[in-house]
Amino acid sequence: MIARIEHKGRHFSVDLSKPIDLSLPVQDGDEQVRAWWVDPVTMEPVRNGDVSYAVKDGAPVNFRNIRFNPHGHGTHTESVGHIAPEIHPVGRLLKRYFYTAQLVSLLPETRRAPDAKEDHVITLEQLRNVVGERPPEALVLRTLPHRTHDERRDWSGTNPCYLQSTACAWLRSIGVKHLLLDLPSVDREEDGGVLAAHHAFWDHPNTLDLDRTITELLHVPRSVHDGEYLLELQVANFGNDAAPSRPVLYALLP
C-alpha cells in the first residue's frame, strides 16, 4: 500500500504495508525488559474465591489483572508531566501520529564521572555531526554496539548510556519535537534527581511544553539502516505522564 505524502513543501512516498516496529513488549515471564529496579511484570487471572478466570482452569474467557510500571517496563512515551508538578497525561497530548523522522546510530563516548564510574555519553558534537541539514520532527537514536537481547534485559544498576543536556537543548533548538531512544532514560541512572537532559529538552520549568515527547526503551533491528523515515507514534491513552507506546518506522521510497 503506497501512500504519497506532501508535508511542509516536501513530497515523498512510503509503503505502509512494510512497517518497522521499534517497540519492546510489556509481558510477564522470564523474557521481559525492565529498569529502575521495578518488580517484574505480573499478569494473573482474576480470582473469585476458588474460581480462577482462566480458560485453562475452566473459565469461559481469560480475564487477567496486570501490574506494571510504564517507565520501567517496555517501550513507553512520556510528556513533560514526568518532571512537572502536574501529570499532563501523555495519552492526550498528540494531535497527529505521523512525523518526519531520522534514524541515527552512535557509539557513545566513554568518560570518567565525578563518582569514579565509567560513563557512556552521547554528546552534542556527535549529534551535530549526524543530524541532517533539514531537521526532522522526530529523532530516533540507536546506540552502538548493537544489542540482540533488549527484550529481556534488566537495565537496573548498569549505569546505562545517557545524553548530554546540551545535546537535548540543541535538539530542541533545531525543532525536534519527539526524541526516541533505545535506552531507559535520556539522563544518567544516578544523577541526584537533577534530570538535566529531560529539563533541557522540555525547557522546564521555564516553559510548559505540551508539544514534545520522549520515548525510551525501544529497539531498532540491526537490519534497519540509518536515514530518513516516516514515523508513526501511537501512545496508549493513559491518564499518566507515561504510557506504553508503539513507534513504527516506514522507509521513504526513492
Image (tube, rainbow, N blue to C red):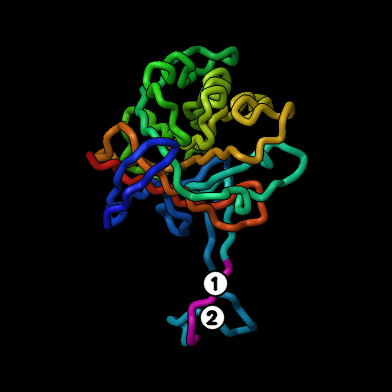
Quarter of image, res 238: bottom right
Quarter of image, res 16: bottom left
Q: Residue 4 placed where, x, y %?
A: 32, 49
Range shown magenta = 59-65
Q: Give the CA distance from mark 2 to mark 1.
A: 7 Å
Q: Quadrant of the N terminus?
A: bottom left
Q: Residue 143 placed where, x, y %?
A: 38, 29
The amino acid pointed to by label 2 is Tyr
Q: Which residue is mark 2?
A: 53
The residue depicted at 31 percent of the width and 32 percent of the height is: 227
Q: Quadrant of the C terminus?
A: top left
- Find out whether residue 73 is within the magenta segment: no
The amino acid pointed to by label 1 is Arg
Q: Which mark is residue 64?
A: 1
Q: Residue 48 placed where, x, y %?
A: 63, 82
The residue depicted at 53 percent of the width and 76 percent of the height is: 63
Horizontal arrangement in the rendering, residue 92 relative to residue 129 (left or right): right
Q: Residue 69 placed where, x, y %?
A: 59, 51
Furthest residue to the left? 254
In this rendering, is residue 198 above or below 12? above
Horizontal arrangement in the rendering, residue 237 relative to residue 119 (left or right): right
Residue placed most toward the observer, 107 or 84: 84
Residues marked 2 and 1 touching at CB (< 8 Å): yes
